[in-house]
Every structure is written in structure tokens, then in C-alpha cells.
Image: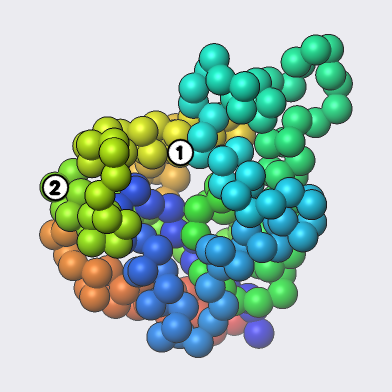
Amino acid sequence: MKKRVITISREFGSGGHSIGKTVAETLGIGFYDQKLLEKIAEETGFSKEFIEEAAEDSTAKNSLLFNLVMNRSLHGRTEPSPADTIYFAQTKIIKSLAEKESCVIVGRCSDYILRDNSDCLHVFIYSDTEDRAKRILERYGESEKPIQKRIADKDARRKIYYSHYTDRPWGMPQNYDLCLNSRVLGEELCVNIIMNSFNGLEKADLKNG
């Protein structure tokens, strides 16, 4: 039986995590978000916290973290940067997961890493700012930073990280099989659409086989 994978890319606060988790639970397949971070941590020796920072806190170009994580030529170094090491590890792990099991993988450039895998369904979840702000406040609560600033910063970080390693724009419809507006459709309908599309891959394969 072929292994089929759903990759979930998402705007911050769009509900992509919960949608992906529900899809995985309903289909009875693996779900990799924090579990993927744990695997990357085991592979690289970095903490989960550092891995998350390397992926999303590297936009302040004058910061020490940016230079540590993103600048491969810092002080004449020729070895991979920590961010490169993390990316190489996650690429290896994601490809291995796709070979071993059907699953849902959230983020980590998984849509790009598995772009040549015909048994993948690549999904992008988005929503309007008001809906995202409400969801973020419900899940994470208030912080010192205004909610609109939190959304803008998080999306900017994801865009920079994604484009840095894929050489293509983050969130472009052409990169995905499905682009779903979670506010308009609602999370339940998003789940159903993804599941129907996923099941359609299997039916098409059986028909062609």
C-alpha cells in the first residue's frame, strides 16, 4: 500500500494546526508538528526552543541570532550554519516519514521538500486578520506586543525562512493543491475537504492500477 502524506502550510492563527490534527485523527494516521520538532532535536542535538527560533526568529538582521543562524560566512566559516544543519535534518526526516507512513506534516517547508512526491496533498490554510487575531488570543492570550504586530511579525518570519531555503515565495497558490480560507469555510468544512481530496488520491490510484 502506498504511503500518502498531507502537508499543511498555514498563516499564523489560521487554525492550520488544529485542522491538520483533526484530519490525522479522523484518518487514523500520524500527525507531525511538535513530534517533528522532537525528531529534529534528536537528530541535531539542538533544543526544540532553539529549532523554533532558528526557523522563525531570524528576521532581525542586526541581531546576534540572525548572524548565528542565517549567515553562513560569519567569521569565514565554511561549515553549515545551525539553521542549515536543522534544515538538512528536517529534510531527511520528512522524506523518511513519507516513505514509511501515511501522515500529516505541519510546516517545516514540507510542501517544498516533498514537492516531487506524487502521493502528497499540499494544503495552505489562510484567513483574514480579524479571524486570526481572535483565534490567537483564544489560544495564546494577550502579550505586550499588539496582536496585529504579532501576526505581521510571525508571517514575515515564516516568509523569510521559507524563501531562504526554497527560493520561492511563501503562500503562493501555485505551490499547493488546495488553498482554504478557514474563516469562510470553517474548520470542520476544511477538514472534510482535505479528507475527501486525500481519499480521492487513493481512489484514483486504485482506478489507474
Q: Are marks 1 and 2 in contact (CB under 8 Å)?
A: no
Q: Residues within 10 Å of mark 2 (few under 14, many from 20)?
A: few
Identified by mark 2, the residue type is Glu
Q: Earlier in the sequence, mark 1 or mark 2?
A: 2
User: Label 1 to label 2, Cα distance in Å?
Assistant: 19 Å
Identified by mark 1, the residue type is Arg
Q: Could you tell me which secondary element the residue under label 2 belongs to?
A: helix
Q: Is residue 69 above or below residue 53?
A: above
Q: Could you tell me which secondary element the residue under label 1 belongs to?
A: helix
Position of residue 89 in the picture relative to residue 199 (left or right): right
Position of residue 18 in the picture relative to residue 166 (left or right): left
Identify the image quadrant of residue 85.
top right
Residue 130: mark in rendering: 2
Q: Is residue 203 above or below residue 85?
A: below
Which part of the image, by quadrant, shows the C terminus? Answer: bottom right
Q: Residues within 10 Å of mark 1 (few under 14, many from 20)?
A: many
Q: Residue at x 57, y 77 (%)?
A: 30
Which part of the image, by quadrant, shows the N terminus? Answer: bottom right
Q: Residue at x 43, y 53 (%)?
A: 9
Number of numbered discs on residues: 2
Q: Position of residue 88 (x, y in %)?
A: 74, 44
Q: Residue at x 80, y 31 (%)?
A: 80
From where the camera sits, is residue 112 visible? no
Residue 89: mark in rendering: none
Q: Position of residue 64 (x, y in %)?
A: 62, 22
Q: Residue at x 72, y 56 (%)?
A: 41
From where the camera sits, is residue 59 visible? yes
Q: Is residue 111 above or below residue 174?
A: below
Q: Position of residue 53 (x, y in %)?
A: 56, 41
Residue 158: mark in rendering: 1
Q: Nearer the viewer, residue 81 or 101?
A: 81
